[in-house]
């Protein structure tokens, strides 16, 4: 099976073999198209970006076919919820992949992250799962004996960085403004006292790469986030991408991502968050394997283990 997620910064592709025993990744890649910034500036996906998207999707579909995938599920996230020409995007998706575009809501994104991380198992302790995207940050609070609570912070790494950073590298004053804006945004998040936090997605993974050179460490502590912010404040973008295994488009938006990760830990009085390699694509693949075409209708019960 295969899944594609069209996000604010990247278009991600995962193909996997899914069985009752688990999921085995066969292919996993991403293409940086920065659709979120285009929608922020123009309100729609520009023709050249639409062409790039179609080319990318055709390549992904060919890979899925080569691997023998019996289905490819294509979802859109934050930028496509706002794009005025989402119908044109849907046409491009169907032409390139022979599959419909399914635009997810914030709650579906959060539940898919939770499903990917926990696999339908109820957590033994109150757990916070956060996905800091380019344009928004979805989070979910899950605990024993109750349904998960999902919500969104309406800013992400790319949007926050673009709004407040004009220098390369960002100045100390710009980081002060970023921190203030992140704390204000996350300050409206649901009050809770989770016993642990899990972060998913490219922002968390690339912050790990920044502070340790690889993503072999599996946790982001407040001290590591402070170190990451120090590196970002001291290092121009060109030197950053030469010295660390991070692509330029990703490195450019890390200032906003770092302060948002820090703000989530502060808001929930946590000292660290585990970084999971799982993503909403794994969540989609498992949900489709379990529920077929009805996976969106059954997502809540799948996450709850029913």
Image (tube, rainbow, N blue to C red):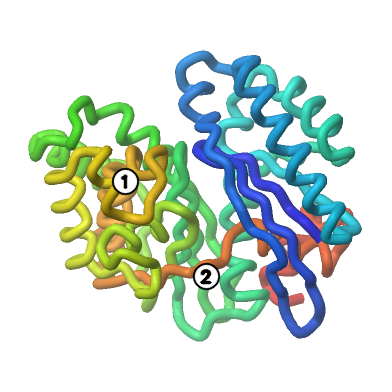
Task: Residue lying at the far front in this picture: please name it.
Answer: 242
Tag 2, which secondary structure?
strand
Dot 1: within a 10 Å radius of its alpha carbon, few (fewer than 14), some, or many (20 or more) residues?
some
The residue that disc 2 covers is 142
Q: Closer to the camera, 60 or 131?
A: 60
Q: Is residue 261 above or below residue 127?
A: above
Question: Which of the numbered marks, if any, corresponds to residue 111?
Answer: none
Camera-side mark, 2 or 1: 1
Q: Horizontal placement of 272 versus 108: left or right?
A: left
Q: Position of residue 268 (x, y in %)?
A: 30, 64
The residue that disc 1 covers is 241
Q: Horizontal placement of 89 versus 116: left or right?
A: right
Q: Position of residue 211 (x, y in %)?
A: 25, 63
> Would you say the residues marked 2 and 1 are in contact, meaning their CB atoms lie under 8 Å apart?
no
What residue do we see at 64% from left, 58% from top? Answer: 28
Do we see residue 187 in this rendering? no
Q: Closer to the camera, 188 or 6?
A: 6
Do we see residue 188 in this rendering? yes
Q: Horizontal placement of 42 versus 292: left or right?
A: left
Name the image quarter holding residue 169.
top left
State how many labels appear: 2
Tag 1, which secondary structure?
helix
Q: Quadrant of the C terminus?
A: bottom right
Real-space CA distance between mark 2 and mark 1, rounded to the nearest whole angstrom: 36 Å
Q: Is residue 121 above or below residue 130?
A: below
């Amino acid at each position: 099976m295969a899944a594609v997620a069209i996000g604010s910064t990247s278009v991600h592709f995962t193909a996997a073999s899914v069985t009752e025993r688990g999921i085995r990744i066969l292919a996993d890649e991403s293409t940086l198209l920065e659709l979120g910034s285009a929608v922020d500036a123009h309100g729609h996906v520009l023709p050249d970006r639409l062409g790039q998207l179609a080319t990318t999707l055709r390549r992904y579909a060919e890979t899925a076919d080569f691997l023998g995938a019996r289905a490819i599920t294509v979802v859109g996230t934050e930028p496509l919820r706002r794009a005025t020409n989402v119908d044109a995007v849907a046409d491009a998706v169907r032409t390139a992949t022979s599959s419909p575009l399914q635009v997810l809501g914030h709650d579906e994104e959060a539940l898919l992250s939770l499903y990917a991380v926990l696999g339908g198992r109820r957590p033994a302790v109150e757990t916070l799962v956060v996905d800091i995207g380019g344009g928004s940050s979805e989070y979910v609070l899950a605990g024993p004996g109750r349904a998960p609570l999902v919500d969104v912070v309406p800013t992400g790494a790319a949007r926050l960085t673009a709004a407040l950073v004009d220098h390369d590298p960002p100045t100390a004053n710009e980081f002060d403004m970023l921190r203030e804006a992140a704390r204000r945004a996350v300050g409206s998040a649901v009050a809770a006292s989770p016993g642990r936090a899990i972060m998913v997605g490219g922002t968390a993974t690339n912050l790990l790469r920044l502070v340790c050179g690889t993503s072999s460490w599996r946790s982001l502590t407040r001290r590591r986030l402070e170190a990451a912010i120090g590196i970002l404040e001291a290092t121009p973008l060109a030197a950053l991408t030469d010295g660390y295994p991070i692509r330029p488009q990703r490195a450019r938006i890390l200032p906003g991502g770092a302060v948002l990760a820090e703000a989530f830990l502060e808001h929930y009085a946590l000292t660290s968050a585990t970084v999971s390699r799982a993503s909403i694509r794994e969540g989609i693949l498992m949900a489709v394997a379990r529920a077929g075409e009805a996976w969106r209708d059954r997502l809540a019960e799948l996450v709850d283990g029913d």
